[in-house]
Amino acid sequence: MNKTPRCLFHSNLAAFSTADETGIFGLLCDNYHGDALTTTREAWKSELSILKQVLAPYQAENGQIIFEYDIPRLGKRIDAVLLLRGIIFCLEFKVGEAHILEADVDQVLDYALDLKNFHKFSQDRIIVPILIATNYRSSSTDVQMSTYDDMVVNPLVTGKDGLHQMIRMVINKYPGEAPVNPNWIISPYAPTPTIIEAARTLYENHSVENITRHEADKVSTDRTIATILQIIHDSKVAQKKSICFVTGVPGAGKTLVGLDVAIRQTYQGLDEPVKDEGAVYLSGNGPLVAVLTEALAQDNQKRCRERNEKKKMSDSRREVSKSIQMIHRYRDNMLAKIKNPVENGILEIDPEKAIKLERTGYGEVEHVAIFDEAQRAWTKKRLADYLKRGGTYGNKLKVPNFPMSEAAFLIWSLNQREDWATIICLVGGGQEINTGEAGISEWITALNEHFPDWHVYISPKLTEAEYAEGRVKELLKDNPHVTYNEDLHLGVSLRSFRAEKLSAFVHSLLAFDNISASIYAEIKDKYPIVLTRDMAKARRWLHERVRGSERTGILVTKESARFKPLAVHILPSGDENAVHWFLEDKADTRSSNYLEDAATEIQVQGLELDYTCVLWDADMRYDNGKWRYYRFNGQTKWAEMTPTSESKQDLIKYMLNAYRVLLTRARMGMVICVPEGNGNKTATGFWEDSTRLPEYYNGTYQYLKSLGIEEI
C-alpha cells in the first residue's frame, strides 16, 4: 500500500481488505496536494466503506485498487480504478446523490476513453466505466460493448447497494481475460490535449509536464521549449536583443509551446511571478484569445469555489489576461507613449507621456513577447489605415501617417528596453487567411532595415516555399547575426493523435500531389475521413461518433455563401459567440455540438474540435486539375476570381489557406460534405436556384472521391 506520483493511494486487494479504513483515509489526506475540502474527505470515507464491502469476496484475487488516479489531459482524477480479472473498472462516485445526471455519465466515460486512447497498458483491455450515485435505487441491467469496437463498455450506473452485483455481472459477461500488466499504474501515458485543456493545465500547474506525448521520440515540443528558454537566458546574460522564428505543421503544438514559454518564463518554477522577468503570449486571433481567457478564468473560478475562496469572475479574467493578450491591445500600450503626429516617418517616445527608467529605458513592456501566428501580422498599409481612423478595438487614438508594419512596431517596442529582450514568432506555413496579413517576409524586412543588431534564431524550415514565398534565405543573406536551429521546428501533428500524417494529406490534396490517395489509405483506419453530399448524413455521422464531452462542429469558409438551404447558419462575428460555441456543453443551443451554427477559418484557427464537418461550398471548385475561385455577389451569382493583380493573387491564396485551416481542425476524424446543389427547374424551364447549380460542386466531389475517400 503506497502512493505513486500518479495516484493518492493504491493497494493489492488482499492488503486492502485487511487494512484499517482510518489509516487509508489518513494516507489519502496526507498525499493530497493542499488541504482537502470537507466534502472531499467525507466522500473518501464513504467510498472506502463501500469498496471495503464490495471487494471483500475478491480479497484472494490478483487485483489492485487505486484511489484518485491522475488523468493529466483532463486535469482530473478518477475516484477509483479497480483492476480485477483482466478488466479495468473506472469508478466515479457521487456521494449522497439519488439521481443520475448526463454530465456525470459523460465524466466517467471521458475517463474510460482517456485510458483507452492514451494509456499504453489499457489500450488492449476491456474498460468498464461505472457511475455510482450512492442513493440511486436502481442499476443498469445490460452490459454491452460500445458500437465503436474499442473494448470500452457502454457506461453503467448504479447505487451503492448495486455495485457488487454489477461488478459480478461484468466479470461473468467477460470471463477468462488475461491479467492486467502489474505495472499498469506507471504505464506510459501519451495524451494529446486540446489547446484549451493544455492551457488550463499550464495555468494551474505552471508546467507542461505530463500533458504532451513525451515518450514519442520524434515529438519535439520539449526540445523546442528548452531551446527557446536557453535563447532567452543567453539574451539576458549577454544583455542583447534576440528574435526566434519557430515553425510547425498544423496542429504541431505551436500555441502550446508559446503558452508554455510564457508561463515558465513568468513563474520560473515558483508560485508567484518573478519580478521584471515576465513574458506575454500575444495573438491577433481574437476568438482564440477570448476562448482561452474565458476557459482559464472559468477554471480559476471553479477551483476557488472548491477551496471556499471568494473571487469575482472579473478578477479571474483580469488575472488571466496578464499572460494572454490581444496583440492590438498590447500594441496600444506603446502607441500611447509616442510623439503624435509622427514627424519625418520616425517613431519617438514622447517624454511627457512616459517615464524613463534607470535600467530599462522607456521599455514599459515585458522582456519576452511571444507572437502566435506571426505570419498574420498586419502590413504597413493595413496598420496605417487602422490608426488613421482611430482603430476598431476600443482604441480611439488616431495616428496619421504611421510609418511601420505591425511586425516592425512590435520589434521597435521591445527595442525601447535598454537592457535585453526576446521576441518569439510562432509561424504557421500557408496559413495567412486575411487580406492585410503581411506574412513572415515583413518581419525579416523590418530586421534588415531597422534593427540590424538583433540576433536572429531561425528554423531551417522557414526557407521553404510556403513561408515568405521561399525568399527567406535571400532576405537574410547579408545579416551577420543569423543562427539556424533544427529544434525550432515542430514537425509532428499533436492535434490529431490518430493521424500524424493528416497535415501531409491535406497539403497533398490541395496541391494535387499524386501521393494523396496513398496517404489517405495509410491513415483512414486510424483517422476516419469520409465524404457525403447530404448534410443530414453528415450530422448523423458526427452524432454517432462523439462520446462523453467530445466536441463536434460544422466548419465553412468565410467566402461560403449558399449554406442556408442546408439548414446551416454562420456563427455571428464577435468573440463572445466563439466562446459559447467552443465552451458550452451539449445542452446549450449555442454549443458547436448542436451542429446549427458553422464557424469560419477566422473563428477556429488555433483551436480544434474532436470531429468536424467541413462544408465545401462553391467558393473553391475543382476543375480539370486546378482550383478555381469564386466570390458570391450577395444576391444572384458567383464571380470568378482571377489573379490579375497582386491583391487578387493574395485573396486567392487566402481562399486556399482557408480550406487548409478547416481541414486540419479535427483531432479524431472528419466528414467532408460537398452538396449536390439544386438541379431542379421551374415549370417555365428556368433554374430553381441558379446560385447552387450541380456543376458548381460536382468537380470537387469527383476529385475527392478519386482519392479513395469513403462515401457515406
Image: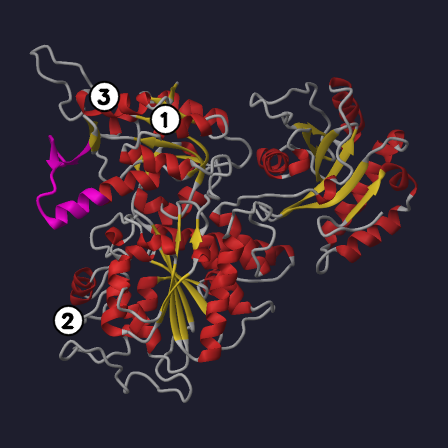
563 and 510: which is toward the camera: 510
Identify the residue at image location x=27%, y=24%: 703
**Residue type (three-letter) at the residue carrying disc 1:** Ala
Q: Is residue 559 left or right of residue 59?
A: left
Residue 94 location, x and y as percent? 69, 39
**Residue type (three-letter) at the residue carrying disc 2:** Pro
Q: Nearer the viewer, mark 1 or mark 2?
A: 1
Task: Say if 351 sits above or below 345 in the image.
Answer: below
Q: Is residue 663 magenta?
A: no
Q: Earlier in the sequence, mark 3 or mark 1?
A: 1
Q: Farthest top residue?
A: 683
Identify the residue at image location x=49%, y=74%: 277
460 and 125: which is toward the camera: 460
The residue range painted magenta reads: 627-653
Number of residue marks = 3
- What residue did someone put label 1 on? 517
Task: State how the image is colored.
Answer: secondary structure
Q: Nearer the viewer, mark 2 or mark 3?
A: 3
Identify the residue at image location x=57%, y=45%: 216
- What residue did someone put label 3 on? 698
Q: Nearer the viewer, mark 3 or mark 1?
A: 1
The part of the image, by quadrant, that contains residue 415 is bottom left
Q: Earlier in the sequence, mark 1 or mark 2?
A: 2
The part of the image, by quadrant, that contains residue 422 is bottom left
Identify the residue at image location x=15%, y=26%: 691
SS at circle 3: helix
Residue 382 location, x and y as percent? 19, 60
Q: Which mark is residue 400?
A: 2
Disc 3 crowd, CA 10 A, few/some/many (<14, 14-19, 20+):
some
Task: Say if 51 sits above or below 682 in the image.
Answer: below
Report, in whole angstroms, how far the alpha carbon at label 3 lies from the one at label 1. 19 Å
